[in-house]
Amino acid sequence: MNNKNIKTIIAAVAIIFSSGTFEKASAQVSNTLSLSGDVATLLALAIAPSGADSLDLEGGAVNDATIATITEFCNDADGYTVSVTSANGQALGTNVGILQGGDHSENAEYTLKYDNSPVSLLGGTATVTNSNDKTVAAGVSRSLKITYDESSSNLAADTYTDTLTFTITAK
């Protein structure tokens, strides 16, 4: 700091004290400063596919094949829910997932397990997580498994697809 700045500061302090804006105190003066900060609700859902795009429909029945790992993250202390919707199951109003052929003439039904618990689709949608607490900082990873029976091995030549949509919501 140069001398000009120091002289300016001293002059400003002198003006403040001479303006009478401060009251004289006896032995002690105190005041308060409130501190506050906000943390926004954060939600994240990461999907790591593991064979979901290369299901072996010709090989017969598949039981509890892992097709993805889903990592849930929520910092809301009240908790969160995660739901899954099968696009074909919802469109067709079924209580199972549907792998539908491109020409829509044949379908293959499937069921899911989320974190080793059966998923009960109702009209193509199910709640798969209902937590009353926030997740740990790294989130919570859960496996997604698929099961379909041997009827898939007699399907017409086609590509059979469905889209699963996962949604995380803070409570």
Image (tube, grey):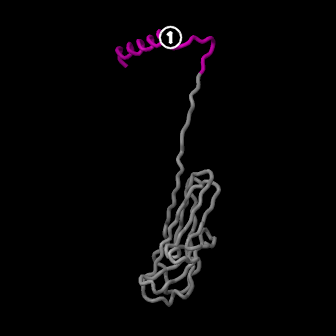
Q: Look at the numbered disc 1 and give the secondary structure of its residue.
A: loop
Q: Residue at x 47, y 11 (%)?
A: 19
Which amino acid, by three-letter code, is at mark 1?
Gly
Residue 147 lies in quadrant: bottom right
**Residue closest to the far top:** 18
Q: Residue at x 42, y 13 (%)?
A: 10
Q: Which residues are magenta?
A: 1-30
In the rendered image, residue 24, in percent from the top left (x then y), is placed at 57, 11
Give the labeled residue for mark 1: 20
Question: Is 80 a magenta residue?
Answer: no
Q: Is residue 6 left or right of residue 58?
A: left
In the rendered image, residue 148, in percent from the top left (x then y), is placed at 56, 82
Q: Residue at x 57, y 51 (%)?
A: 75
Picture layout, residue 81 above or below residue 10: below
In the rendered image, residue 37, in percent from the top left (x then y), is placed at 54, 39
Q: Residue at x 45, y 14 (%)?
A: 13
Residue 74 lies in quadrant: bottom right
Q: Quadrant of the N terminus?
A: top left
**Circle 1: is it few (<14), some (14-19), or many (20+) Cα within 10 Å?**
few
Picture layout, residue 24 above or below residue 141: above
Q: Quadrant of the C terminus?
A: bottom right
Q: Is residue 134 left or right of residue 49?
A: right
